[in-house]
Image (tube, grey):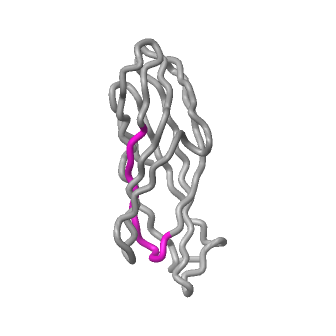
Amino acid sequence: MVTAVTEGIQVSVEVTYQAEFSSPHQHHFVFTYKVTILNKSPYTVQLLKRKWEIYDAAETVKTVEGDGVVGQQPILETNESHSYVSGCNLKSGLGKMKGVYYMEKVVDGKSIEAQVPEFQMIANIFHN
């Protein structure tokens, strides 16, 4: 698990290689990742948008942007957390991701760019 904290917003990521959904011989590697966002700031915040950079050893960098996370724009009060699971397909068994969550303080609309820590995706194809 990797963690980053930006202005009291803690983002932790745990990644899992999904061997049962992958086909290494067809260059298809599936990973899931669980993200937990914990608001340690004294402000209520809302996650509005996300931006990911996805690095695959077999491809160039992909950038993915969109509203919220898995269809939600959670509002987090102080000491509240939000967790979700998402996934990523790679053409190689080696990659990494990092990103940013664009959030705002509910009280005054001020922006926070909460960093999503870089995490590695490594397929464990040599063990059963």
The image quarter containing residue 92 is bottom left
Q: Is residue 99 magenta?
A: yes
Q: Horizontal and vertical percent for residue 8?
A: 37, 25
In the image, the segment drawn in magenta is 90-101
Q: Is residue 32 magenta?
A: no
**How many numbered badges does the structure rendering display?**
0
Where is the C terminus found, in terms of image quarters?
bottom right
Q: Horizontal and vertical percent for residue 87?
A: 56, 58
Q: Horizontal and vertical percent for residue 103?
A: 43, 30
The image quarter containing residue 20 is bottom right
> Height in image: 52 above or below 68?
below
| Of 123 and 83, the residue lying toward us | 83
> Height in image: 5 above or below 117?
above
SS assignment for the magenta stretch, majority: strand
- The residue lying furthest to the right in this view is 20
Picture residue at 55% right of the left edge, 23% below the top: 80
- The residue lying furthest to the bottom in this view is 25
Q: Horizontal and vertical percent for residue 118?
A: 36, 52
Picture residue at 53% right of the left edge, 67% below the top: 89
Picture residue at 36% right of the left edge, 21% below the top: 110
Picture residue at 53% right of the left edge, 39% below the top: 68
> Height in image: 55 above or below 118?
below
> Height in image: 110 above or below 5?
above
